[in-house]
Image (tube, helix red, strand yellow):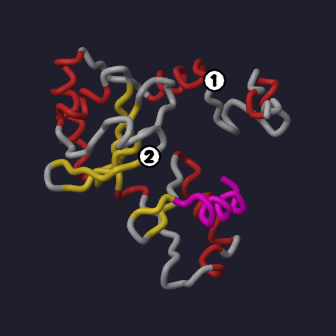
């Protein structure tokens, strides 16, 4: 994410959690995004007592549960989150818990299938992973590696800028034209 894109996102689309706005970056560029936002003066553009850029990467782990039975699997683990479509639509988040620790449940999909990302303190990730694996047996769940996830994402047509594209690739080069078609009005 560029610094200006981050600033635009922060001011217009930040995820409101109570009275806080959270901008989460991920992957290997998380540090670069936080540094770019800092260099762009994000902290100086807002009340310094309310805007802080903090790299919390090592403190949290995120587990992905994906597939047509993912909702049932999460319900079996019992995170205390209403997973109905109306309560947790695609691209929404809710807070639950596991073993007395908060879990952020985000409904996103990089596979084209129903998916959830579970973010939990890193020191509690292994017990959650084990609980998901155990409960998953009833649903014939299998482990999915990062490379398989990336292949499913690419097959669905979800592009990652910089991975599937370069500075010269346009969406239409990849067969993505929907956003550029004129809407009938």
Please identify, in this view, whether the residue under mark 2 or under mark 1 is nearer the observer: 2
In this view, the residue farthest toward the right is 168
Q: Which residue is drawn at 35% across and 53% down?
A: 60
Q: Answer whether residue 170 is visible to the viewer in this image.
A: no
Percent x, y for residue 102? 25, 55
Decide: is 45 above or below 32. below
* Residue 144, placed above or below residue 16: above
- The Cα–Cα distance between marks 2 and 1, rounded to whole angstroms, is 21 Å
Disc marking residue 157: 1
Given residues 142 and 104, the one toward you in this image is: 104
Q: Name the residue under label 2.
A: 92
Left of 157 or right of it: where is 17?
left
**Which residue is pictured at 60% across the width and 64% down the height?**
10
Residue 31 lies in magenta, yes or no?
no
Q: How crowded is mark 2: few (under 14 residues within 10 Å), some or many (20 or more)?
A: some
To which quarter of the image does residue 131 belong? Answer: top left
Q: Is mark 2 on a helix, strand or loop?
A: loop
| Dominant secondary structure (helix, strand or loop) of the stretch shown in magenta | helix
Residues shaded magenta: 1-14
Q: Determine whether 18 is above or below 116 in the image.
A: below
Lateral position of residue 11 relative to residue 179, left or right: left
User: Which of pointers 2 and 1 lies earlier in the amino acid sequence?
Assistant: 2
């Amino acid at each position: 994410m560029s610094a200006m894109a981050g600033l635009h996102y922060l001011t217009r689309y930040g995820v409101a959690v109570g009275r806080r706005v959270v901008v989460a970056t991920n992957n290997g560029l998380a540090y670069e995004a936080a540094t770019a936002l800092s260099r762009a003066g994000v902290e100086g553009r807002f009340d310094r007592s309310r805007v802080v850029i903090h790299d919390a990467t090592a403190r949290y782990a995120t587990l992905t549960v994906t597939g047509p039975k993912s909702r049932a699997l999460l319900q079996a683990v019992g995170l205390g989150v209403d997973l109905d479509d109306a309560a947790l639509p695609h691209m929404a988040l809710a807070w639950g818990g596991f073993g007395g620790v908060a879990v952020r449940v985000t409904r996103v999909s990089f596979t084209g299938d129903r998916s959830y990302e579970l973010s939990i303190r890193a020191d509690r990730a292994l017990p959650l992973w084990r609980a998901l694996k155990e409960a998953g047996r009833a649903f014939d769940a299998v482990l999915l590696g990062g490379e398989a996830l990336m292949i499913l994402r690419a097959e669905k047509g979800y592009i990652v800028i910089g991975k599937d594209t370069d500075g010269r690739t346009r969406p239409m080069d990849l067969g993505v034209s929907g956003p550029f078609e004129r809407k009938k009005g």
